[in-house]
Amino acid sequence: MEKTETVTYDLDRLEKAGLKGMAATIKKLKDKKAKMLVAYECYRFVKPEKFDAFNERLRKETWNPQTYTYNRLRFTALENYDKVPPMSVIEEIEKANDRACFDRYEVADIESVQELPDPIVFGVIDGCSDKFYIAQWDNDVKIEDILNSNEG
């Protein structure tokens, strides 16, 4: 088996040589690796597939075909969360802050979603923020609810 060599870069030398972008990229990767080492050592982790499976199970268990509603897991950035968590949670966040391994925090809770069955189809062009009306059906939302007849 071939042995792989670990390469260590002197970031100051790279910057002085004019490779500032590469030095920044390497520093960012090193910082990410250091954060991940601490996070994986100190905390339980959840892979995206587990969240997907949970949401799929939750949707099946809570789907109501009469109201077109179901529940799902919602993630809210901690800075936008509108409730105060218990002090025990704040203490754990403070401990995590001391470890300096996270860039931000998110709060997960369950939300009820109503799926309206009669949509509008819009065309989208990558890089263009406008959406282009294609067609609509039934009556829960119409292009006339969004645009006046002389717009668009």
Image: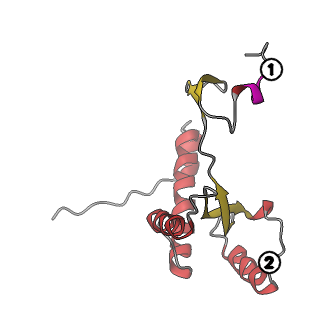
- Residue at 56%, 24% (x, y): give it: 125
Is label 2 in a helix, a strand or a loop? loop
Q: Which residue is mark 2?
A: 85
Q: Is residue 120 left or right of residue 94?
A: left
Disc ID at residue 12: none
- Residue at 55%, 60% (x, y): give it: 32
Vertical comparison of 90 with 33: above or below: below
Q: Position of residue 130 (x, y in %)?
A: 67, 24
Residue 103: tell me if it is visible: no
Disc ID at residue 148: 1
User: What amino acid is labelled 2 in the image?
Assistant: Pro
Q: Quarter of the image containing the C terminus?
A: top right
Task: Say if the magenta span includes residue 73.
Answer: no
Q: Is residue 42 left or right of residue 80?
A: left
Q: Nearer the viewer, residue 38 or 8?
A: 38
Residue 66: tell me if it is visible: yes
Vertical comparison of 94 with 35: above or below: below
Q: Nearer the viewer, residue 143 or 48?
A: 143
Q: Main secondary structure of the magenta part?
A: helix
Is label 1 in a helix, a strand or a loop? loop
1 or 2: tag closer to the N-terminus = 2
Q: Nearer the viewer, residue 139 or 105?
A: 139
Q: Residues within 10 Å of mark 2 (few under 14, many from 20)?
A: few
What segment is highlighted magenta in the picture?
144-148
Q: Are marks 1 and 2 in contact (CB under 8 Å)?
A: no
Q: Quarter of the image containing the N terminus?
A: bottom left
Q: How is the image coloured?
A: secondary structure
Q: Position of residue 92 (x, y in %)?
A: 71, 82
Q: Position of residue 12 (x, y in %)?
A: 58, 49
